[in-house]
Image (tube, rainbow, N blue to C red):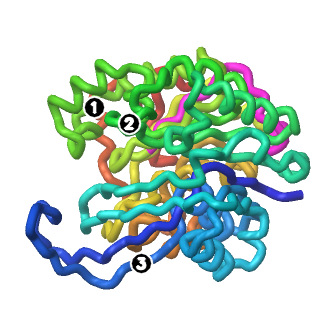
């Protein structure tokens, strides 16, 4: 049986290596800024989660749309270079342009993107290979805000896609991406979309910025004006992820895993769990949990794809049958390995090597939770929330 099928957004990433000490801003009218060679990799949820899962040792299948153009051919070539089987389930959309991103990823600074959605905009429920999902333990779908059919019409097609996936018996995981406030995805009715989608989802794994934008736009805009994009997470009160996670549980998700950037990852679970084929007997020690894992200390070389790889560590923990504490720890460990290289996945280690690095006493960063109502557990290195059962 396949461990994980990853579907959704897929693109080609072109990542120029930007030296330390480069001017800020990098781009301004008339300026030529010299950079290093480019790293060319596949990107998006399909590639980032899929390749990270493969490197962690999981039996992985990838599902996404590419065009019949040179970029689509390069996507297949890059995926097949890692493993010849990884590109075999991709769908070729004749006459459509493949998706690509130019990733501006300066050392020590969060990344920015110039992105063309391409064939991702035409991905729909009929692209889901149900025969593959019936033999899969877990199905992960990523980035509906970058896939027009997934957010159009109030997310009806996204809900249908997730319903079909859940009906196969696979555990269903859903990730998001940041909607573009200047485009249609930023104007979509995300509270309605999530209301329709989350009852079909076992695991909801967004970032805090995405979730705040989708569920409480006025609070997002106020925090953005106060702290700026780079300072939002640092300035955020821990009550924000707690409140948003509770909303997601009320909408139907059973496990809410929120990426908190350099402050780590937050987990909240429902009181009664049915987690599908990936975790049929894990309710006892996963129900009613509230935990926060600080990041591990590393030298950051690039943050592109770090959220996806953090998710992958968490999903791998679920598939390995570990405790919630261990899954959350492995999530931030895999994410830390990812940011040690400019591209998303070349720094990822096999599961056993990652676990050994954690066990060797890998130091952690300060999550900024003192005085927040969370209690630090010296044994696990995690913070227990007020609602942790």
* Residue 104 sits above or below residue 164 on the image: below
Quarter of the figure with residue 49: bottom right
N-terminal-most mark, 3 or 1? 3
Q: Nearer the viewer, residue 215 or 294?
A: 215
Residue 165 badge: none
**Which is more toward the observer, 381 or 343?**
343
Nearer to us of marks 3 and 2 is 2
Left or right position of 169 against 329: right
At 17% from the left and 35% from the top, the residue drawn is 227
Q: Which residue is mark 1?
A: 236
Name the residue beneath numbered marker 3: 39
**Disc sitting over residue 183 in the figure:** 2
Residue 350 in view here: no
Is 232 colored magenta in this rendering? no
Asked if residue 269 is among those painted magenta in the image, a careful observer would answer yes
At x 75%, y 54%, the residue is 5
Q: What is the secondary structure assignment of the residue under circle 3? A: strand
Q: Which is more N-terminal, label 1 or label 2? A: 2
Q: Say which quadrant the N terminus sits in.
A: bottom right
- Secondary structure character of the magenta stretch overall: loop
Disc 3 and disc 2: Cα gap in Å?
28 Å
Asked whether, in this view, residue 68 is left or right of residue 229, the answer is right
Q: Is residue 112 left or right of residue 85?
A: left
* Range drawn in magenta: 265-281
Compared to residue 345, the image places residue 44 above or below, namely: above
Q: Which image quarter is the C terminus in?
A: top right
> To which quarter of the image does residue 362 belong?
bottom left
Q: Position of residue 331 (x, y in %)?
A: 54, 52
Residue 363 percent across, percent down from the top left: 38, 61
- In the rendered image, residue 268, in percent from the top left (x then y), is placed at 55, 29
């Amino acid at each position: 049986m396949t461990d994980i099928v990853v579907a959704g957004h897929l693109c080609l990433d072109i990542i120029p290596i930007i030296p330390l000490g480069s001017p800020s801003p990098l781009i301004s009218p008339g300026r030529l800024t010299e950079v290093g060679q480019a790293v060319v990799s596949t990107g998006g949820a399909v590639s980032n989660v899929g390749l990270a899962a493969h490197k962690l040792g999981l039996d992985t299948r990838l599902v996404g749309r590419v065009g019949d153009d040179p970029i689509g051919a390069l996507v297949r070539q890059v995926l097949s270079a890692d493993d010849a089987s990884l590109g075999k389930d991709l769908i070729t959309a004749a006459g459509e342009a493949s998706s690509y991103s130019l990733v501006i990823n300066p050392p020590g600074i969060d990344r920015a993107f110039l992105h063309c959605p391409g064939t991702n905009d035409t991905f729909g429920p009929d692209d889901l290979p149900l025969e593959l999902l019936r033999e899969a333990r877990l199905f992960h779908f990523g980035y509906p805000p970058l896939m027009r059919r997934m957010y159009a019409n109030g997310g009806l097609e996204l809900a249908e896609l997730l319903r079909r996936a859940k009906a196969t018996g696979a555990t269903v995981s859903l990730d998001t991406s940041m909607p573009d406030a200047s485009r249609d995805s930023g104007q979509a009715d995300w509270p309605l979309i999530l209301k329709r989608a989350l009852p079909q989802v076992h695991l909801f794994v967004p970032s805090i910025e995405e979730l705040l934008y989708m569920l409480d736009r006025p609070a997002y805009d106020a925090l953005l004006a106060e702290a700026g994009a780079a300072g939002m997470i640092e300035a955020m009160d821990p009550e924000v992820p707690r409140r948003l996670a509770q909303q997601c549980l009320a909408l139907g998700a059973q496990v809410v895993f929120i990426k908190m950037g350099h402050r780590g990852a937050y987990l909240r679970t429902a009181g009664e769990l049915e987690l599908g084929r990936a975790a049929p007997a894990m309710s006892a020690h996963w129900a009613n949990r509230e935990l926060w894992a600080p990041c591990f200390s590393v030298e950051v070389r690039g943050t592109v794809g770090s959220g996806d790889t953090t998710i992958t560590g968490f999903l791998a923990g679920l598939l390995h049958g570990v405790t919630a504490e261990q899954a959350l720890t492995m999530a931030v460990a895999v994410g830390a390995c990812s940011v040690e290289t400019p591209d998303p996945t070349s720094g990822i280690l096999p599961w056993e090597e990652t676990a050994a690095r954690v066990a060797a006493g890998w130091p952690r960063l300060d999550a900024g939770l003192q005085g927040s109502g969370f209690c630090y557990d010296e044994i696990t290195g995690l913070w227990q929330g007020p609602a942790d059962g």
